Image (cartoon, rainbow, N blue to C red):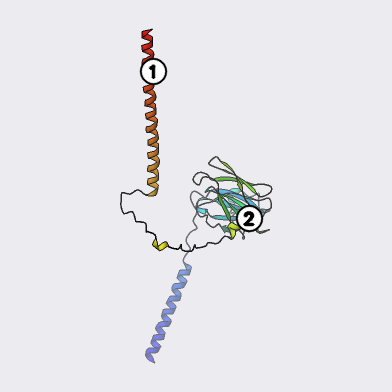
Amino acid sequence: MKERAEMFKEIREEGVVFLEEDEEEEKKELPPICFPNPPSPLCCGFYSQPGQFWLSMGGFDTGFLYHCKLSEDQDEDLLQRQDEPFAFRHISDADDNPICSMTFSFSRQLLLCSMQSGSIRVYPLQPGDHSLTSMQAYWALNVHNNQYGHLRHVRCSLDDLFVLTAGHDGNICFCLLPPEEQQKTLERKTKIPSPRVGLENDALALDIEDPAAYCIETAKQKMEKDNLRREAELKEVETQRQLVELQRRFKQVLNDNQSA
């Protein structure tokens, strides 16, 4: 009984120590908020309600929409204001692909987003959804160059069937947005194809073990260079043939001139 009492005493003492350590951990300061330098660029924005608007950011804040509202005291100095967003929305598949422009269809049922990758996204929204909670599934279409074709403007036709886009690649594109195609894309589910019959009888492809073998991209670049060099050689041969013909004709003219 004496040993048991001493054991419970040690357990209680250790419990007190654990509680003290937990309190010390709670008192530790949280890490400071990260302020990117330079600040994240502002890509676009649109009003949600009177005095409230959504902002799309790039850089450090890529992939998020921030819900903001105008300051109540409009006479206050802009440099003294400490305005902050009161809500945000994370955009799926956009962590490195910010939204450059946003607009609504004329029916106000679709939100059209032009992406930095040169594609457009169409989000179906619920009526009166100012907080964009229904901004989940989307229909996407690549229309511009994904390297330097950042979309800056997107507009929808009056019948909501066509979209006009303008990108940094210098192109203006008309896109068809058939409702049935959007619905198929949004409802499409991934299907695993059934195994092909007789697949076990096919010969397996051999691995390329040669360390000097070209990869697919290098082989493609080499083929393009070979084609350019072959075209240059053919052009050089043709030029030499024309020079030989001109020399022959020149000598013929000289002979005719001397004989005359």
Question: In the image, what residue occupies the spot 47% across and 72% down?
Answer: 23
The one nearer the camera, 133 or 77, is: 133
Q: Where is residue 142 in the image (x, y as percent from the top left)?
A: 54, 49
Q: Which of marks 2 and 1 is nearer the N terminus?
A: 2
Q: Position of residue 247 (x, y in %)?
A: 36, 19
- From the image, tell me which residue sits under label 2: 180
Query: For the view shown, which residue lies furthest in the bottom direction?
Result: 1
Q: Position of residue 32 (x, y in %)?
A: 48, 59
Q: Where is residue 165 in the image (x, y as percent from the top left)?
A: 59, 45
* In-image side of 54 versus 201 (left or right): right
* Quadrant in which the C terminus appears: top left
Q: What element carries label 2?
A: helix
The one nearer the camera, 142 or 7, is: 142
Residue type beneath disc 1: Arg
Is any atom of residue 87 visible in this view?
no
- From the image, tell me which residue sits under label 1: 249
The one nearer the camera, 87 or 208, is: 208
